[in-house]
Image (cartoon, rainbow, N blue to C red):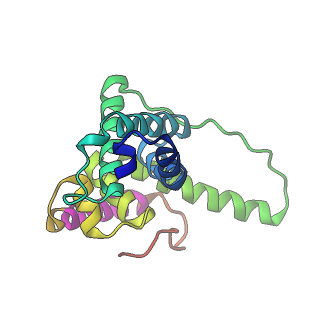
Amino acid sequence: MARVQRRDQQAFTRLLDRHLVSLQRFLQRLTGNAADADEVAQEAFLRIWSHASRWQSDRVRFTTWLYRIARNVAIDRHRKHRETTTDDLSMIVDDAPETATIIDGERRQRLLRNAVEQLPERQRTALVLCHFDGLSNQDAAAVLEVSVDALESLLSRARRTLKMTLLPLMKTDEALPCPTNR
């Protein structure tokens, strides 16, 4: 990042190569839409390039700063657009026994994804950062600019809301595919 601050384009390309995929995954979970995630990621990296001089290595890790910028861009876009897009994917279904299993698994994933998207923004971000992107509670708290205790409270409320939302929707007692608590 020090080289990027000196306007080294090769260093910036290296940062982009190293962090783009994980940032897009985070943003897709946050926004619920791959196209929006790509646009937000591009905007976040443009801001990294434009404001490289603002990064202070002694104050925050680069990934924390990147995720914070990306989260803020996503929030700004959401405020501007205030519209929810959903993927309209149709499947060709056959009568094979494994098809029912696949559809049931996809249904569960869709229910989980929709429930996560309905969480308040801060709870959703905390959940995505810790459970899906694997950030430590300390790093996720830094991205959200809250204390670790506040982050843990957000996670607890998110889990409680997901449980109350999903349990009535599930037809079987089979557990939802959900990462373990970190």
**What are the residue bounds of the magenta stretch?**
151-167
For image coordinates 33% across by 23% down, the residue present is 80
Q: Is residue 2 left or right of residue 20?
A: left
For image coordinates 55% across by 40% down, the residue present is 34
Place of residue 106 in the rendered image (x, y in percent of width and height, measured from the top left): 63, 56
Place of residue 136 in the rendered image (x, y in percent of width and height, measured from the top left): 32, 70
Q: The C terminus is located in which quarter?
A: bottom left
Image quadrant where residue 131 sits: bottom left
The reply to whether residue 120 is visible in this rendering is no
Q: Nearer the viewer, residue 91 or 179?
A: 179
Place of residue 22 in the rendered image (x, y in percent of width and height, measured from the top left): 50, 55
Q: Nearer the viewer, residue 149 or 88?
A: 149
Q: Is residue 17 magenta?
A: no
Image: 129 above or below 10: below
Q: Is residue 13 left or right of residue 168?
A: right
Image: 132 above or below 91: below
